[in-house]
Image (spheres, grey):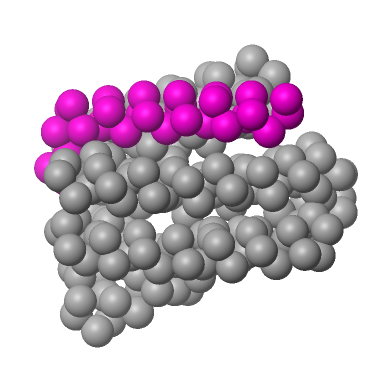
Amino acid sequence: MPGPPGPPGSLSWPGSLAARVTYLLEPKNWLIVTVVGVGAHADGLAGAGWGLLAAFFAAVLPTVFISYGIRRGRWEDRNVGDRRPRLAVLAFITASVATGLILLAVLGAPALLTGYLAFMLASVAVLAAITLVWKISIHCAVAAGSVTVLALVYGPLVFGGYLLVGLLGWSRVAVRDHTVLQVVGGSVLGAAAAFLAYAAIVA
């Protein structure tokens, strides 16, 4: 797992403001907060523990895989911009989340948390399919989906988190990893999918 960011100007800390925003608001961080938050809402402290276990499969293992790919020279950075390696990363994430989902279901984790992981698994498959033809922003899809789910769980004040989604979208365009349309498409898809998934889970 990547170590903590170094001081500005070091190799581990992006130089520009936009790159730093991308670094701090990457999918891993959104997913950790979301699965722990969903778990805690479902079953208090015990649910937060289930959320940490889910975070291991949904965020930590994929981050380790991405970092390994960087060290091996398979992709340049944590954003994995090229299509073919991005599909490889999505395939690994799919396998990791599926493993976590099966484990949590067998061990008796809260239904809301396992339902969220199932939604995440479906979302990764959809994003992978879109990536075959168009470079949709996965960063923004994850961020918008996370804000939507947490707002539905904890209340409308959390919708203020969309300001961070907007900031992230700006950064993805500013570092030239995405177009405005790709950022908007990812954000809308992530939010809509999260809303529909939550409605299905609690129905």
Which residues, given as a range, are shown in magenta? Answer: 175-203
In the image, residue 186 lies in the stretch drawn in magenta:
yes
Q: Nearer the viewer, residue 125 or 96?
A: 125
Q: Which residue is at the far bottom?
A: 72
Give coordinates of residue 17: x percent, y percent: 26, 42
Q: Picture coordinates of residue 81 (x, y %)? A: 19, 56
Q: Is residue 69 left or right of residue 31?
A: left
Tell me the residue at 19%/50% (across/down): 132
Membership of 23 in magenta stretch:
no
Left or right of residue 183, residue 43 in this image: right
Image: 46 above or below 99: above
Judge by depth and name the residue closer to the eye, 2 or 93.
93
Tally of numbered discs? 0
Looking at the rendered image, the quarter that the C terminus falls into is: top right
Percent across and percent down for residue 21 are 34, 43
Residue found at x 69% / y 49%: 114
Residue plotted at (79% across, 55% down): 109
- Residues 200 and 5: in front is 200
Which quadrant of the view contains residue 77? Answer: bottom left
| Residue 67 seen anywhere in this rendered image of the structure | yes
Asked where in the image residue 100 lies, by quadrant, the reply is bottom right
Q: Position of residue 20 (x, y in %)?
A: 32, 48
Q: Residue furthest top?
A: 156
Q: Which residue is drawn at the image coordinates 53% and 19% (left, top)?
A: 160
Q: Nearer the viewer, residue 146 or 164?
A: 146
Does residue 113 sit above or below 92 in this rendering? above
* Magenta stretch prevailing secondary structure: helix
| Residue 16 in view of the camera | no
